[in-house]
Amino acid sequence: MKETTKDLQGLVKQSLTSVALHRQSQEALLPQRLQADGCVEITPFRGDKASPTDILFAINKLSTAFPARNQSFWELLSLRIAERGMTTEELEFAVNETIDNFNYQTLTIADIMKQGVKLKVKLLSYSAMLAECTKNGTTTEDYCTIKVRGVEKPCWLLKTDKAIHHIPDEL
């Protein structure tokens, strides 16, 4: 088990390095996507990427809650978490949501991974925000602005999203 854990930690570290590079390139594209589409969905999870220790802690928690899965399942899940580049906050959210809400016969990797992905926040241009107000029956009073690096004009998001997810004034 100790050898497997060391091997797994090595694979996770390699995956985290490649994911960090990919995420940087995606974040660099945010201004272009926002300007082109007027709307971009982002994850509200901030902070550092989950470390190998964070991932092993999460796997331990899940394997305790779902003991029927074998070791290769947990190893593959660890790699998927690292390759996806989940933040510590996103990983904790996904694990807790899975433990609290999973009620099917067999746990799959997708059941865990989709928990963090399903939580998104919309960043909008001014015109897209007005269109959302018309479409959803909201008003401009329901939105606030934030600054996004690389975007000249302010972006808009729901005040409730900003408060609930502790989104900073500048991204």
Image (cartoon, grey):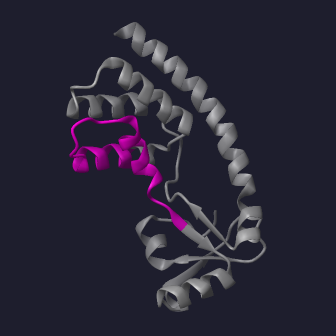
Q: Is residue 85 above or below residue 132?
A: above
In the figure, is residue 93 to the left or right of 135? left
Q: Which residues are magenta?
A: 92-121
Residue found farthest to the top: 3
In the image, what residue occupies the spot 56% across and 69% down?
Answer: 122
- The answer, for residue 95, to whether it is visible in the render is yes
Q: Quadrant of residue 73?
A: top left
Residue 147: x and y, percent? 67, 71
Q: How many marks?
A: 0
Residue at 23% of width from left, 32% of height from top? 66
Q: Is residue 89 visible?
A: no
Foreground: 104 or 148? Answer: 104
In the image, residue 140 above or below residue 3: below
Residue 56 falls in which quadrant of the image?
A: top left
The structure residue drawn at horizontal position 21% and vertical position 34%, both measured from the top left corner, is: 65
Image quadrant for the C terminus? Answer: bottom right
Question: Foreground residue, 104 or 138?
Answer: 104
Based on the picture, tell me whether residue 48 belongs to the magenta stretch: no
Q: Quadrant of residue 92?
A: top left
Q: Position of residue 153 (x, y in %)?
A: 75, 77
Decide which of 65, 137 is in the foreground and name it: 137
Residue 114 shown in magenta: yes
Magenta: main secondary structure: helix
> At x 41% / y 34%, what residue is drawn?
54
